[in-house]
């Protein structure tokens, strides 16, 4: 019986490669944090646009905006603090016959600087970032 020896990596070589990959990730992570924060803010933008559409429907039906999520049939997603997936909490901060303003406030600090991201949308569908994380 002939046994052919296969070339392979040993455990030390694999560990060195894993350490090098780990160091490279640690070096790259600070540069990726703004991109991660920007990506997570897409959740807030999408939900606020949805709230805007629901508020407009409410306005067309009864000629005024609502300050109640139940009245416009918006169910706020559970946040990560409530064992959900949402990174933002949503509020209608102003509603009258002619205007409304809704706000999305981050429940987690994406880059660890103590500043929480805040977005707002109004009755003109103007979406703006109030506090940048």
Image (cartoon, rainbow, N blue to C red):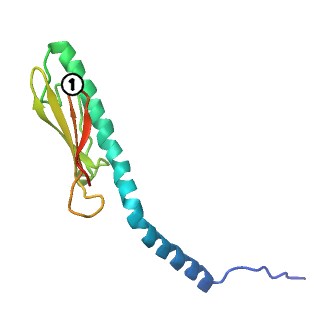
Q: Position of residue 103 (x, y in %)?
A: 19, 40
Left or right of 59: which side holds 86? right
> Is 107 located above or below residue 12 in the figure?
above
- Disc 1 packing (10 Å; few <14; some 14–19; many ≥20): many
For label 1, the SS is helix
Along the line of sight, the residue nearer the viewer: 123 or 75: 123
Q: Position of residue 10 (x, y in %)?
A: 65, 84
Query: Left or right: 114 with respect to 94?
Result: right
Report which quarter residue 58 is drawn in.
Answer: top left
Decide which of 59, 35 is in the foreground and name it: 35
Quadrant of residue 65 within the rendered picture: top left
- State the residue in front, 16 or 114: 114
Q: Residue furthest bottom?
A: 12
Residue of label 1:
55
Residue 114 placement: quadrant? bottom left
Q: Residue at x 34, y 54 (%)?
A: 37
Left or right of 117? Residue 28 is right
Q: Tell me: 105 left or right of 47.
A: left
x%, y% of residue 111? 30, 61
Q: Is residue 42 above or below residue 23?
A: above
Residue 100 coordinates in the image, percent (x, y): 15, 28
Q: Which residue is at 25% across, 47% downward?
A: 88
Q: In the rendered view of the protein, which quadrant contains the N terminus?
A: bottom right
């Amino acid at each position: 019986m002939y046994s052919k020896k296969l070339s392979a990596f040993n455990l030390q070589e694999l560990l060195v490669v894993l350490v090098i990959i780990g160091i490279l990730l640690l070096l790259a992570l600070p540069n990726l944090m703004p991109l991660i924060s920007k990506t997570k803010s897409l959740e807030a933008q999408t939900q606020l646009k949805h709230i805007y559409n629901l508020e407009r429907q409410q306005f067309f039906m009864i000629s005024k905006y609502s300050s109640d999520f139940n009245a416009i049939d918006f169910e706020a997603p559970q946040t990560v603090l409530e064992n959900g997936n949402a990174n933002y909490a949503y509020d209608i901060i102003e509603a009258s016959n002619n205007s409304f303003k809704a706000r999305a406030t981050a429940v987690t600090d994406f880059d660890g600087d103590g500043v929480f991201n805040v977005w707002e949308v109004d009755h003109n569908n103007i979406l703006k970032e109030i506090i940048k994380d």
